[in-house]
Image: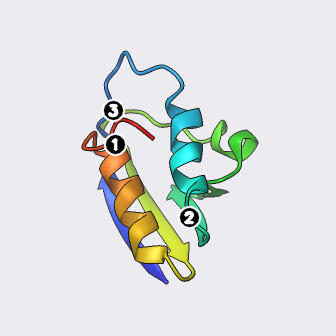
């Protein structure tokens, strides 16, 4: 398993940030979860992800397990830290 913790830094005007995040996660075969507080959500589930707050300065842990886990964690880290804005 590969994991990383990131501080959310998304543009305030970004629409559909949850949908874009799900698209980024869905590009990978690994099982990917985001953890914020006591919530652990499947990053590929739009319904689950809608329950996870993505507010700037929130600290979120990314966990991935599978053949492309490192790449998945890196891509989601880049997205949440505003270094990758296009899915």
- Label 3, on which residue? 10
Front disc: 1 or 2: 2
> Element at badge 2?
loop
The answer to whether 43 is drawn above or below residue 57 in the figure is below
Q: Residue at x 66, y 36 (%)?
A: 50
* Mark 1 to mark 2 CA distance (whole Å): 21 Å
Q: Are marks 1 and 3 in contact (CB under 8 Å)?
A: yes
In front here: 53 or 72? 72
Q: Is 73 situated left or right of 7 in this image? A: right
* Mark 3 to mark 2 CA distance (whole Å): 21 Å
Tell me which corner region of the image, top left, top right, bottom left or bottom right, holds residue 22: top right
Report crowding for label 1: few under 14, some 14 to 19, many 20 or more residues within 10 A (C-alpha).
some
The answer to whether 25 is drawn above or below residue 23 in the figure is below
Q: Is 7 situated left or right of 54 in this image? A: left
x and y, in percent, of residue 85 in the image: 34, 36
**Residue 27 image label:** none
Q: Residue at x 35, y 63 (%)?
A: 74
x and y, in percent, of residue 51 in the image: 66, 39
Mark 3 vs 2, N-terminal side: 3
Looking at the image, the residue that sits furthest to the right is 47
Looking at the image, the residue that sits furthest to the top is 13
**Residue 8 image label:** 1
Mark 1 vs 2, N-terminal side: 1
């Amino acid at each position: 398993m590969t994991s990383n913790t990131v501080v959310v830094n998304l543009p305030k005007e970004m629409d559909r940030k949850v949908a874009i995040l799900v698209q980024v996660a869905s590009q990978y075969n690994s099982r990917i979860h985001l953890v914020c507080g006591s919530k652990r959500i499947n990053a590929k589930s739009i319904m689950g992800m809608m329950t996870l707050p993505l507010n700037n300065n929130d600290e979120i842990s990314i966990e991935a397990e599978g053949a492309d886990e490192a790449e998945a964690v890196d891509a989601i880290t880049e997205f949440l830290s505003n270094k990758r804005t296009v899915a």
